[in-house]
Image (cartoon, rainbow, N blue to C red):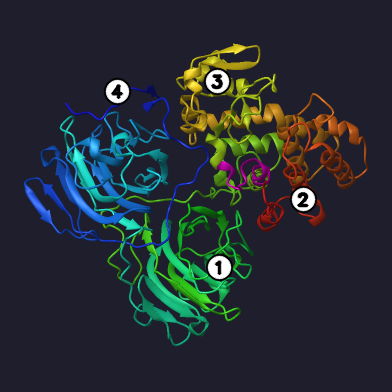
Amino acid sequence: MKIEIASSGELLGGHLVPDGVRRHAASQPASAVLMAWVTRSFKAAVVGTVLVGASLAASAATITSSSGFVNSSVSSQTGAFTATFDATPSISPANDVLSFSNGAQTAYTGLAASVRFNTTGTIDARNGGIYAAAMNIPFSAGSSYHFRMVINVASHTYSAFVTPPGGSEQTIASNYAFRTEQAGISSINNFDANVNATPGGSLTYTAPTIAGGSSSSSVSSSSISSSSSSSKASSSSSVSGGTTINSSNGFVNSALTGQTGSFTATFDASPSVSPANDILSFSNGAQTAYTGMAASVRFSTTGVIDARNGGVYAAASNIPFSAGANYHFRLVVNVLAHTYSAYVTPPGGSELTIGTNYAFRTEQAGITSINNFNANVNAAPGGSLTYTLPVITGSTSSSSSSSKSSSSASSTSSSSSSSSSSSSSSSTGSGCAVTSHDASFSSDTLNFLCSKTGFDGEQWDNIMKIVNKPEQDSLNWVAAYSYCEDINDGRGFTMGIVGATTGGPNDGGPDGPALFKNFDALKGASSPSTLNGLKRLGITATMSGSIIKFNSADISGNTTSKFCTAIHNLQNDAQWRAAIWQTAYDSYISVAMTNFKSRGFKNAATVGSFFDTALNEGGSGDANSLQGLIDQVGSYSSEADFMTKFHNLRLKIVNTNGYNQSPNGTNRVKQWMQLYTDGELDLKNADAEVIKVTTWTLK
């Protein structure tokens, strides 16, 4: 019986969680320089028949346990690349493994990066010495699942994602280690599929499509003169990997299969100059003006990459671009919600977020279909743009672009990759309007925050972006739900989006114990406690007063310790996220709101500044805490005058007592001061302003 179960590790929520798993907190998946979609022939035993050279776009292989380890060569990869494929298990539970390796393999020990339909009926991935998963993802017999794996051969790590039928993409693994026996390989050149005899069944799968690879071949795209309709006569030419246009080509349109729901589009683009003014967009029908573009990314005139959000261009972080470099874009578009998220992978870097749940351009807020891709180079400053036509996956009517590229999405895919979008209803249920930022929160958290504070998802998302800048040097605060690290500040381990601590010599009243107690309660405990909450993670600890005391074995390795690994695995756990917000409210938001309401204040920026102060310096307890500073300010007739005095007082102490390293503390306060200077106080339609106030260098 060859069942792929590790011999060591803790069984946690159906997932094995080992000691010392190589995981990294709040990290992004690695990707690479160029996108190149590759259609490879492959061999597979198909119920007594061998399929040789089956086309990716036209066929899939079905194998059983009698097929053994079925190997298919892929172009050799030595850096970072992305692979996508579909797979359908015939039974659930199962024991079907799909893997990437160095050379053809005949045993599990030879597989480097693997995803699995497992014997408990869920999907997991190999992490060093065991299988594990970031969240519980059940699978059904006969259903097709769309997998995306982002693999970094040089660092021997990978991230894995899956889109269930009719659902959104879910994280299986984030920066998991290659299988222990394969930790030293220098290339990947093989794809392997295997069905274990126990419990048997069959597996149908497509050969992988490789993108962004270190040695992958280019898209076979046709010239725009034959595959697009341009507002001007086209003089652009087809080049290796894409099409090159300049300002004389006008708006270059390429027809797509109509999309009416959610879909994901990937493409590459390379500007010839920086700064530039090059725009790549999705629209309803061919367009001849910018106002016709619904979802757009841009190489901008300031030398950074941004995206259209309603009436303005904005970006979640500062992403510079270089002339002649190739950038890999991924857009997750929801036509029904009229929102989209955009991501880009710079050369040799990790995927970065351009914008999350941005609104379609204002003039296109009512469209019901997207069926066109558009590229444009503005005459000022000019230059040229080389790009590949988009590959559409996970859609309600999934198909590749009309270029008829050999890299079209697999016809066997029945999954629907939905973007994280807001509800189509008009309110959250507690009186706050639905916004394009709501996908950063669960509906329960939105209702909780609205009922407790009166502010909506857009306002709280903007608050959290500004708060997260000095904490994680990123606007992607959602990634920090699974953050865990002992930063050697004498406060124990710091966790999650609000930096809850487990306590130490410099923190005798930590909020970590309350967090684990809330977690235990939300998991259904009738008599919740801190220690029981920790036991749910496989951690046995004791309390020394208010401080959590761990077994040394559980915290050895800091961010890769058993304790932090358990926290990393909670990234998408609904009860963990809810527990963090409950703890944040009890410890920080409540004192902020009490002072806010008692003074009759109105501005979301004030709540954000109060909340940030409480997080950084404590809600109460001494003169430097939020309550202490408010008491020192005294009474003022206007909210603006009060906040001017408050911010000036905070500037005096924010770089002292270990709160922040100078000048980080000063910049932290100046973010909120700038909002008042600019009059952006309600934090509505403030995406550009949030970028502005957070554009500073963290020391």
Q: Tell me which numbered mark, 1 or 2, is placed earlier along the sequence.
A: 1
Distance of label 1 from label 3 (alpha carbons): 48 Å
Q: Main secondary structure of the magenta part?
A: helix
Q: Nearer the viewer, residue 698 or 143?
A: 698
| Residue that numbered label 3 is attached to | 521
Q: Tell me which numbered mark, 1 or 3, is placed earlier along the sequence.
A: 1
In front: label 1 or label 3: 1
Q: Which residues are magenta?
A: 465-478
| Residue that numbered label 1 is attached to | 299
What label sits on residue 506 in the rendered view? Answer: none
Give the left or right position of residue 369, taking residue 143 as reference: right
Residue 574: x %, y % from top left: 51, 33
> What amino acid is labelled 2 in the image?
Leu
In front: label 2 or label 4: 4
| Residue that numbered label 4 is attached to | 7
Residue 579: x %, y % from top left: 58, 28
| Residue that numbered label 2 is attached to | 681
Give the left or right position of residue 515, taking residue 655 as reference: left
> What amino acid is labelled 4 in the image?
Ser
